[in-house]
Image (cartoon, helix red, strand yellow):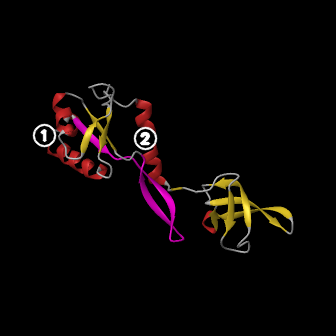
Amino acid sequence: MTETIPWYAIQTYSGHENKVQKLIQRRIEEEPGEVEERQIREVIVPTQEVMEIRNGKRVTVTKRLYPGYVLVQMILNERTQHVINNIQGVIKFVGSGRSPQPLREDEINKILGVEIEAEDEAHEEIPFHIDQVVEVTKGPFTDFSGTVQEVYPDKGKVKVEVSLFGRPTSVELDYTDLKGY
């Protein structure tokens, strides 16, 4: 039976997550012995790929799920806690009182699952919500105003109800062709 090594969240200075990750990774690699024998095992900065609109074009961007935090899988003792706390950019371990609290297994599985899923497929981040009033900026309905009825993140589309000859008409549009008010 293999013992599962707990994960701990470490608060870092905002924007220093990757730097802290590299410094911890270097400490892991410097530690003698086989990987299975090491007390500090792994370090990650949970991220997710999302689609954003920049200058009117879709761009895939990597976003941190928890800005200001790094996750470390390790056996907690005085030595490992001292090693992590003395890495440049680390503020403190997350936990109540003086002792760091490990993440619950369901929490870490969710975080790691999100990270694995994000590698497979980038998720569309559509900036519109149901009942929001929008203006169509491209296509045959340019300059029409309408109300968002449905959002389809998997397709990058939004169903908008516009008034066409005085009648409400539903049209499915690419979300890049819309502007919110």
Which amino acid type is marked by label 1? Pro
Above/below status of 139 relative to 161: below
Q: Label 1: few (<14), some or many (≥20) within 10 Å? A: few
Above/below status of 120 relative to 75: below
Which amino acid type is marked by label 2? Ile
Q: Label 2: few (<14), some or many (≥20) within 10 Å? A: some
Q: Label 1's element?
A: loop
Tell me the quarter of the picture where residue 135 sits.
bottom right
Tell me the quarter of the picture where residue 127 sits.
bottom right
Could you tell me residue 5's position as x and y percent? Answer: 30, 31
Q: Label 2's element?
A: helix
- Residue at 41% in and 42% down: 112
Q: Nearer the viewer, residue 108 or 171?
A: 171
**Residue 9 horizontal side relative to residue 153, left or right:** left
Q: Nearer the viewer, residue 139 or 25?
A: 139
**Residue 11 horizontal side relative to residue 124, left or right:** left
Dominant SS type (magenta): strand
Could you tell me residue 73's position as x and y percent? Answer: 29, 36
Could you tell me residue 13's position as x and y percent? Answer: 29, 47
- Residue at 62% in and 56% down: 128
**Quarter of the figure that contains the N terminus:** top left
**Residue 137 horizontal side relative to residue 122, left or right:** right
> Which residue corresponds to mark 2?
111
- Residue at 54% in and 55% down: 125
Span of residues in magenta = 40-65
- Residue at 68% in and 51% down: 130
> Which residue corresponds to mark 1?
32
